[in-house]
Image (cartoon, grey):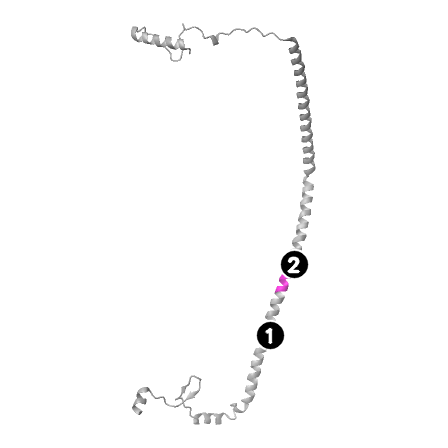
């Protein structure tokens, strides 16, 4: 909206308030009697005359530019197609069929099984060696215990042989019983710190004072 139209609207709005023509105006809209803006008047401009020499040169340069542009575009397209073809060949070479994939997986599985078998054999061998060492240690321990038991048994046999004369049999049972009945055992004794028996009476401190 031009400044002229804005001023006219203000003037008419003020007169409307005074005279009250019962006219209303739409905000930001020109009245019908305001002339058309110069920017809205479309006029056909006269073409600028061309220089024939300049036009010839520009045409030649434009043809050269278009030729160079087309050649570069064709080169890039050809190069991109070659790259796509090479990628496709690589993909076709690296892509395997189901039979080939199964065969490759089978070969890898066999190699892995062979390695696992070697590791398992080593583990079994090591485990067997550890078990053999443990069994040998147990056998040595049992042998030592058996030897100790046999030694104790031998000592008991030797002691039994020494006590053979004092054995109680059916023949000397009456004599042994009579000896036991006639023998008196004195239990009124005390033990010293070293384990010996003593029958001496021990006086208390009060008794010692009285005796003194």
Cα–Cα span, label 2 and label 1: 31 Å
Residue beneath disc 2:
122
Picture coordinates of residue 118, whole percent (x, y): 67, 56
Q: Does the rendering let one see residue 24? A: no
The stretch of residues the image draws in magenta is 123-130
SS for tag 2? helix
Q: Residue at x 43, y 93 (%)?
A: 181
Q: Which secondary structure class fits the magenta region best?
A: helix
What residue sits right under mark 1 in the picture?
A: 143
Res 130 visible: yes
Which residue shows up at 59% across the image and 75% down it?
A: 144
Q: Quadrant of the N terminus?
A: top left
Q: In which quadrant of the rendered image does the C terminus lie? A: bottom left
Whole-percent x and y of residue 121? 66, 58
Q: Is residue 28 left or right of residue 111?
A: left
Indicate which disc, 2 or 1, sits on the residue closer to the N terminus: 2
- Give residue 58's position: percent from left, percent from top: 65, 13
Check disc 1: other Cα within 10 Å, few if <14, some if 14-19, many if 20+: few
Residue 204 left/right relative to 128? left
Which one is in front in this view, the residue at disc 2 or the one at disc 1? Answer: 2
Image marks 2 and 1: residues in contact by CB distance under 8 Å? no
Against 212, residue 129 (above or below) is: above
Point out residue 204 in the picture as x, y percentages from the top left corner. Answer: 33, 87
Residue at 55% across / 89% down in the picture?
162
Is 7 magenta? The answer is no
Q: Is residue 47 above or below residue 102?
A: above
């Amino acid at each position: 909206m031009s400044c002229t139209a804005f001023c006219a609207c203000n003037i008419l709005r003020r007169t409307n308030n005074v005279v009250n023509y019962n006219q209303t105006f739409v905000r930001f809209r020109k009245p019908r009697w305001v002339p058309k803006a110069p920017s809205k008047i479309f006029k056909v401009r006269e073409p600028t005359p061309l220089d024939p020499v300049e036009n010839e040169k520009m045409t030649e340069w434009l043809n050269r530019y278009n030729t160079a542009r087309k050649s570069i575009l064709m080169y890039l397209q050809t190069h991109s197609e070659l790259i796509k073809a090479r990628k496709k060949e690589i993909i076709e070479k690296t892509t395997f069929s189901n039979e080939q994939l199964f065969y490759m997986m089978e070969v890898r599985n066999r190699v892995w099984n062979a390695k696992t078998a070697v590791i398992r054999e080593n583990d079994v061998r090591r485990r067997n060696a550890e078990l053999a060492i443990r069994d040998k240690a147990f056998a040595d321990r049992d042998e030592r215990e058996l030897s100790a038991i046999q030694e104790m048994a031998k000592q008991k046999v030797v002691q039994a042989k020494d006590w053979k004369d004092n054995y109680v049999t059916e023949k000397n049972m009456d004599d042994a019983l009579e000896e036991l009945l006639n023998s008196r055992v004195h239990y009124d004794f005390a033990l010293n710190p070293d384990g010996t028996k003593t029958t001496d009476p021990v006086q208390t401190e009060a008794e010692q004072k009285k005796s003194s």
